[in-house]
Image: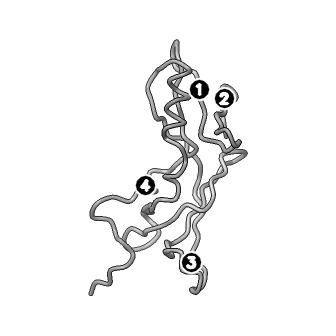
Amino acid sequence: MIPADWTPHRREDGELLGWIRPEGAGWLAVDVLGRELTGEIDWLDAEAVLEEHGIRWLADPWVLEGEAEGPLRVQIVEVVPEGEGRITVKIDDFGDMQRPPTQRYTLAWPLPARLRPHGPGDPDGRTITR
């Protein structure tokens, strides 16, 4: 649930980029997954950080731990911070519209530790090992 003292910050087209929340005598920028992007800064700097951070990173590959024997390469398909909040991910299908739908997982919002950006050494989803 979004705290009442968090102020939404939106792009020019109305898309939510995150929130600005009070922090000490200043403000703190929070992205749409609930991650703190800054320490205490002034309001205009918090807006600038959210604008620069954007949301295109949501389309990048992510890694989900704890659902299979090893980590799963996934894509974020939905972020709903309102109400109880949820993040829905699916096994990365690399945009293949010909294959059957892949497994989906619904996680709590804000971002749980078991969902993280894809990094070096993570499964690429295309390599078959034996």
Mark 4 vs mark 1, CA separation in Å: 23 Å
The amino acid sitting under disc 3 is Thr
Where residue 88 sits, quadrant-wise, is bottom right
Instruction: Tell whether label 2 touches label 4 (CB within 8 Å).
Output: no
- Residue projecting furthest to the top: 25
Where residue 66 sits, quadrant-wise, is bottom left
Mark 1 vs mark 3, CA separation in Å: 36 Å
Quick one: SS at disc 4? strand
User: Is 22 above or below relative to 88?
Assistant: above
Quick one: SS at disc 2? strand
Instruction: Tell whether label 2 touches label 3 (CB within 8 Å).
Output: no
Q: Which mark is residue 116?
A: 4
Q: Residue at x 60, y 62 (%)?
A: 77
Instruction: Tell whether label 2 touches label 1 (CB within 8 Å).
Output: yes
Instruction: Tell whether label 1 touches label 4 (CB within 8 Å).
Output: no
- Give the residue number, with chain letter if any, for mark 1: 21
The amino acid sitting under disc 2 is Thr
Q: How far across and down, in percent of the image, does residue 83 sit? A: 73, 45
The amino acid sitting under disc 1 is Arg
User: Is 78 above or below relative to 93?
Assistant: above
The amino acid sitting under disc 4 is Arg
Q: Say which quadrant the C terminus sits in.
A: bottom left
Mark 1 vs mark 2, CA separation in Å: 6 Å
Q: Earlier in the sequence, mark 1 or mark 2?
A: 2
Q: Say which quadrant the N terminus sits in.
A: top right
Residue mark closest to the camera, 4 vs 2: 2
- Give the residue number, with chain letter if any, for mark 2: 7
In this view of the protein, which residue sits in the foreground, 34 or 11?
Answer: 11
